[in-house]
Image: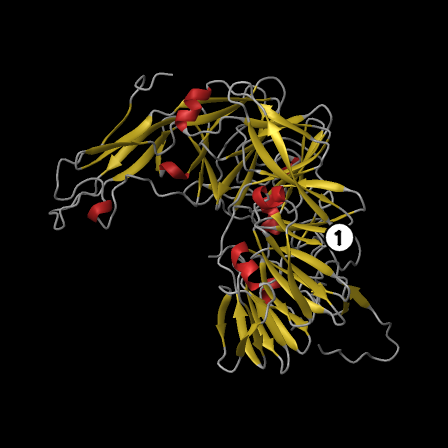
Amino acid sequence: MTTPSMPAGEALERIQCQWCQSMNTKTALACQACGAPLDIRNLVSESGWREAPRIRDMTEIHFGSSTCQVEGEIVPAAEINLGAGDSIFFEHHVMLWKEEQVRLSVMPLAGGMKRVFGGMPFLITVATGPGRIAFSRDASGELVVLPLHPGMELDVREHAFLLSSHHIDYSFVRVKGLTNILFGGQGMYMDRFITTGAPGLLILHGYGNVFERRLAPGESIMVEPGAFLYKDSAVQMEVELQRLGTGLFGGTNINLARMTGPGRVGIQSMYVHHHTE
Amino acid sequence: MFCENCGSKLSGPVNFCTGCGARVRTLAPAPDPQMPASTQPPPVAYQASAAPVHVPVTNYAGRGIPVAESHPAGKCAWCGVTFDASQQNCPKCGAATAMPSRPSNSGWAKLPGRKDMARLNFGKSVCQIEGLYVPVADMKLAPEDSVYFTHNVLLWKDPPVNISAMPLKGAWKRLMGGLPLIMTQAQGPGHIAFSHDGPGELIALPLQPGQSIDVREHLFLAATGNIHYDWFQTNIWFQSRRGNDTETHYPLGQVMDRFGSAQAPGLLLLHAAGNVFVRELAPGQTILVKPTALVFKDPSVQMMLHFEQPAALFNVWNTNQTYLWLRLAGPGRIAVQSVFDRIEGESNITGGSRNPIGGSNAGAQIVGSLLEGLFDR
């Protein structure tokens, strides 16, 4: 990112991005860290859900010494210009194209067999710069750009993550509780992203529109399990069975995930159980 | 000065519109090289009052139809309610008030634009429609209000909101017709939100007392508790035959939903795929639409199937192509969606084994009519 030289005597004005809290120069139109348009008012519903910013076509996002450009609006693609020494990692089936000099390698992961049984991608691929590489997922939706500041821990629905910069530690957690696994509609594992010292960039793909809400400690909300997209790891998730009885047919059941704060919860508005395989 | 994006009146030198948050460009701007062309708000026909635009004006008086003319005094062009002129969205159906809808030259009007986070009122409750892509209906239910909804549309709810099954009559027929057997009911107070998978439009239809509307199956999302729900047999079917197998197809589904409001006005929410277009048919006026594209119609609109075989001098490939249409006859309002399913059993242009009619194994026939009483209610 280049900082324009400031004329003497002019007040230092900054715009804070409402989505990721990064500071931007006052001339910026989109946040340099997450791509959110800065000239659009925050869209928060009365019930407290904030709509994920719709990233304008061709917006540039900066991380490390690399840039990411988000192209397209219906099925957006993230095109990364990797700086030398920077790398990103991703699941399979999301890479759209790459330049020849971008090197691909495989991230060593612990617990490979467990992941195979859990239906998770066995391989996480790492792409190392310099060079350009682009990603997209095969469904209409939104790219959710989450710059992770040091000390954050985020749990993401499996197969929802598109790419992450190498500054972020990747692991996976088993979804706790048999009910959660069987009826949660999201498999056995969640991806967990942890920042260490440096801030990093995480890009998810959400189907439809994406909304985020911050839960106060102890506050809870019931969410359709298929709509869950991400949460802070402090948020508890518990799948509960709701019985809908009718006298005649014995009724039916629906499962709802109870999310309990404190922390952020992200949901997507299209929640068929899409599979990447 | 007015906002170029939403048309709100702006007072004084401001950088952002107080109505929609769009960046306000000053009057003598140096062209901003950083702003890509796509981010510039398109010029909106709001200034049309100065330079009249020629639009076909149709008189849809009182029918709750989008009209071409601008709407003074805060009257919603979509649903006809009057409201405070300062509001950006119609409080009943969410249509953006600053965007007059203009029918196409052939008479279809696109569903009115809606601002993200548009608020609708019903009873003592509020519904906010969030997202423009796969929109979410986020309801804040007052204690005395309730909504019912179909399965697989509940997105989230506050833990205290009670949901229970709403038993429906005629369960056996619904089972045979492939319709959901139960509707789920949610009682206020609290927040509850619905969405339907698939990019498209969330259609808010306020129903006035005495008004009712017919909706094709599986498009229903939610309705307020005071809306009466019924269904009827469409009796729209055709048969296809391949070899010795005769199949009966229901291009509209076996049953159609009918929603009506008895005493109090209610709100009906539908979800349609793609864009939605509405038009009014005059008495006796007919139009042919794809059966799976129909979203809703007034009960006064008649439906029947129509088969069309394009004439050809000689048929080289020995395939008869039959086009299946739904003929709609006015008077009344109809709506279609731009994303629609392929009709199973309709002849396939490529022919071959998927072609249910024609082909060399002859004997293929297709029968369709509006047979009353065949499937007795």
- Tell whether B66 sits left or right of A55: left
Residue that appears at 64% across and 81% down: A85
Residue A142 rendering spot, x and y as whole percentages: 58, 56
Q: Quadrant of the N terminus of chain A?
A: bottom right
Element type at mark 1: loop
User: Can the viewer see residue B113?
Assistant: no
Residue B207 rendering spot, x and y as whole percentages: 57, 26
- Tell whether B291 sits left or right of A213: left
Please name whichever residue, B52 or A150, is drawn nearer the observer in this view of the structure. Answer: A150
Residue B142 rendering spot, x and y as whole percentages: 73, 28
- Tell whether A41 sits left or right of A89: right
Q: Which residue is mark 1?
A: A234
* Quadrant of the rendered image containing residue B358: top left
User: Can the viewer see residue B338?
Assistant: yes
What is the crowding at mark 1: few (fewer than 14 residues within 10 Å), some, or many (at least 20)?
some
Q: Chain of mark 1?
A: A
Q: Please, is residue A130 above or below residue B353 in the view?
A: below
Please name whichever residue, B355 or A150, is drawn nearer the observer in this view of the structure. Answer: A150
Residue A187 rendering spot, x and y as whole percentages: 56, 50
Q: Please, is residue A246 above or below residue B290 in the view?
A: above
Please name whichever residue, B60 or B15, is drawn nearer the observer in this view of the structure. Answer: B15
Residue that appears at 74% across and 57% down: B16
Residue that appears at 72% across and 47% down: A236
Please name whichever residue, B263 or B171, is drawn nearer the observer in this view of the structure. Answer: B171
Q: In the rendered picture of this protein, how many numbered marks are placed on residues? A: 1
Q: Amino acid at mark 1?
A: Ala
Which colour style is shown?
secondary structure
Q: Please, is residue A199 above or below residue B22 in the view?
A: below
